[in-house]
Image (cartoon, rainbow, N blue to C red):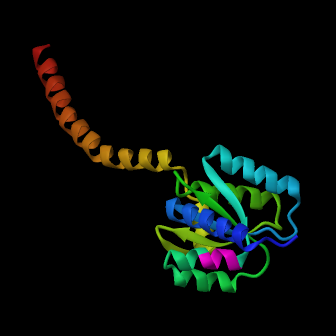
Amino acid sequence: MPKTKEQKNIIVEKLKDKLSSQKANVFLDFAGVDSKTLFKLRDELKAAKCGLEVVKKTLLKKALAFLNNRDLAKKVNDVEGQLALAFGFEDEVAPAKICRNIQKENENLRILGGVFSGQYWGKEKMLELAELPPKNELLGRLVGSLQSPIQNFACVLNGNIKGLMNVLSNIKK
């Protein structure tokens, strides 16, 4: 049964709210994906405080037009197949990672691109983003890189004192 104009306006308003409050999103083509996989994807996204929205391209273009994002609306025209959006409201990388993990299990789910830092990223860049280590691990690597020169300097200084103590202890004998 087709939606009324009021129902479509409500959908466009909800899309505008989600698009304005999201940090990142991933465009997905879910043609040929079974409902079990879609529900699993939705549940994993929900657990990560993300969302999944199956949208009609025309309604998405209207929502993007209201947000003055005409460049992204042009990209939506190029998308073929059924379109779903995975939104990331707290973590920018989580939707891409979760969609990539589900894509590994079901090859029918395809990542088409996405929006990250307010700019459209193509399929390749979104896949690279999905393969990044978690944020905490990257922060740990950064701290280790910053700590390493200081630790090495302290060891060098400590080595000179140990050497002096060895020489003095040998002289004392």
Q: Is residue 161 above or below residue 70?
A: above
Residue 64 point in image, percent of width and height: 56, 76
Q: Is residue 127 magenta?
A: no
Residue 86 point in image, percent of width and height: 65, 61
The front one of 1 and 123 is 1
Q: Is residue 61 magenta?
A: yes
| Quadrant (top left, top right, bottom left, bottom right) of the C terminus | top left
Residue farthest toward the top in the current orientation of the protein? 173
Residue 18 picture quarter: bottom right
Residue 152 picture quarter: top left
Residue 65 point in image, percent of width and height: 55, 80
The residue segment tinted magenta is: 58-62
Residue 17 point in image, percent of width and height: 55, 62
Residue 94 picture quarter: bottom right
Q: Residue at the spot x=38%, y=50% of the render?
A: 142
Q: Residue at the spot x=57%, y=72% of the render?
A: 125
The front one of 144 and 78 is 78
Q: Is residue 55 shown left or right of residue 38?
A: left
Q: Is residue 30 above or below residue 44?
A: below
Magenta highlight: main SS: helix
Q: Is residue 87 above or below residue 4?
A: above
The front one of 31 and 62 is 62
Q: Residue at the spot x=16%, y=30% of the render?
A: 161
Q: Is residue 133 shown left or right of residue 145?
A: right
Q: Residue at the spot x=63%, y=79% of the render?
A: 61
| Quadrant (top left, top right, bottom left, bottom right) of the N terminus | bottom right
Q: Is residue 37 shown left or right of residue 169?
A: right
* Callout count: 0
